[in-house]
Amino acid sequence: GGGGSLVACRSDGQVALIPEAAGGSAMSLPTGLSRLSAVAHSATALALAAPDQLLVVGIAAASSPATVRECPLPPDSAIGALAFDAVLPGLLFAATREGSVHAFNTRGRVADASSASRPRALRRSPPS
């Protein structure tokens, strides 16, 4: 794939993606999140954590709207760090401040077709 992007996050939840490659189009996304605690970026997705929410924003196609998925978090989980797997970029790791690590399949499909218009919950991978 192409080059990377500069990711800028504002306190009001607005996120800007500015491509490093010449001629690329900048993208601005209102996420609705405030008090971001962690951000991770892959070639096709941006993960954003706030105290009580974890969102994955699909950013692969600049010509189509970004897709936003909300990941279900266990109660009282404060995300402190996020990272996409280097080999399987669809796998997102979220580490809590309490020391737990959760894995999310960001490319998983949602079984319920009626949920297509609302944020889709990602399936959490079982612990190994």
Image (cartoon, grey):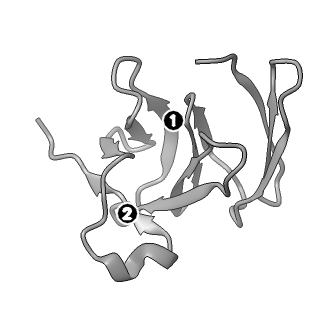
Which disc number belongs to residue 45? none
Q: Distance between the residues labelled 2 and 1?
A: 16 Å
Residue occupying the point 28% across, 56% down: 123
Compared across the picture, whether 71 is left or right of 111 comes to right
Q: What element carries label 1?
A: strand
Amino acid on which the number 1 mark rests in the picture: Ala
The location of residue 64, given as percent across then percent down, is: 67, 53
Please name the residue that numbered disc 2 is placed on.
Answer: 72
Residue 104: x %, y % from top left: 33, 45
With 80 as the anchor, is 29 left or right in this view? right
Residue 92 lies, with reference to residue 89, above or below; the image says below
- Which residue is farthest bottom? 114
55 lies above or below 9: below
Q: In which quarter of the image is the C terminus?
A: top left
In the displayed structure image, the side of residue 83 where residue 3 appears, left or right: right
Residue that protrudes farthest toward the front in the picture: 63
According to the image, label 1 marks what residue?
81
Mark 2 falls on what kind of element? loop
Q: Above or below — where is 7 with respect to 29?
A: above
Tell me what residue is drawn at x 35 percent, y 57 percent. Answer: 122
Q: Residues within 10 Å of mark 2 (few under 14, many from 20)?
A: some
Seen from the viewer's position, the closer of residues 84 and 115 is: 115
Quadrant of the image occupied by residue 11: bottom right
**Residue 81 x/y as whole percent:** 51, 35
The residue lying at 85 percent from left, 36 percent from top is 25
